[in-house]
Image: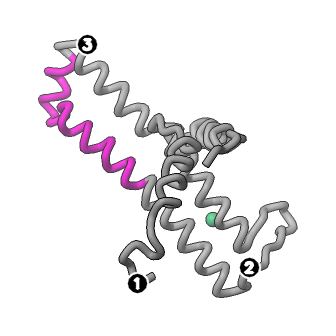
Amino acid sequence: MSYGFGRLNELCDRAYNTSKEHGFWDTFDRVKTIRAAILADYNAAQTLAHFGIDDEFLVELENAIIAQKLALITSEVAEALEAHRESGFAGHTREDGKPEGWGSELADVGVRLGDLATKTGVNLEQEWVNKADFNDTRPRKHGKRY
Ligand SMILES: [Mg+2]
């Protein structure tokens, strides 16, 4: 199926830029900086190794941060569940301008997903189209109960 590419990747980039500007990637980026220093500077590597900080440790730290980001996506799914439990598909805007409710929580899932996609170099729009095209070829429920 053909698809006219729209703005999904722009929204992913916007989510990432906002997240970065607000400091939510600072720790991850610091770990990247330390990894680069270890590779470039033998003395720095020796000093850090003295404290048990080597590349293997730093990769583990990066992986833990990615796991944290995935957990935060699931926390937004949980917020959508709670919004649905309280008000169904309704939404509203608080006095301070913050959108709340079902749609807003689904948007939060998308914002966090887009942030992570951009940071990790995923063309989410293309991946989405690829997956949708594949899903179109699958049989009804493809062996699953639901
Ligand atoms: Mg939320």
Where is residue 71? Give x, y as percent: 43, 61
Where is residue 31? Give x, y as percent: 35, 33
Mark 1–mark 2 contact, CB under 8 Å?
no
User: Label 2 belongs to which residue?
Assistant: 89
Which label is found at residue 145? 1
**Does residue 146 appear to the left or right of 43 in the view shown?**
right
Gap in angstroms between the C-alphas marked 1 and 3: 54 Å
Q: How is the image coloured?
A: one colour
**Does residue 68 appear to the left or right of 86 in the view shown?**
left
Q: Residues within 10 Å of mark 1 (few under 14, many from 20)?
A: few
**Residue type beneath disc 3:** Ala
User: Label 3 belongs to which residue?
Assistant: 40
**Quadrant position of ligand 1:** bottom right
Query: Nearer the observer, disc 1 or disc 3?
Result: 1
Q: Is mark 1 within 8 Å of ligand 1?
A: no
Judged from the image, the secondary structure of the residue bearing numbered disc 2 is: loop
Residue at point 43%, 56% (across, down): 70
Q: Main secondary structure of the magenta part?
A: helix
Judged from the image, the secondary structure of the residue bearing numbered disc 1 is: loop
Query: Vertically, is 32 above or below 5?
Result: above
**Residue type beneath disc 2:** Phe
Front residue of this view, candidates 108 and 34: 108
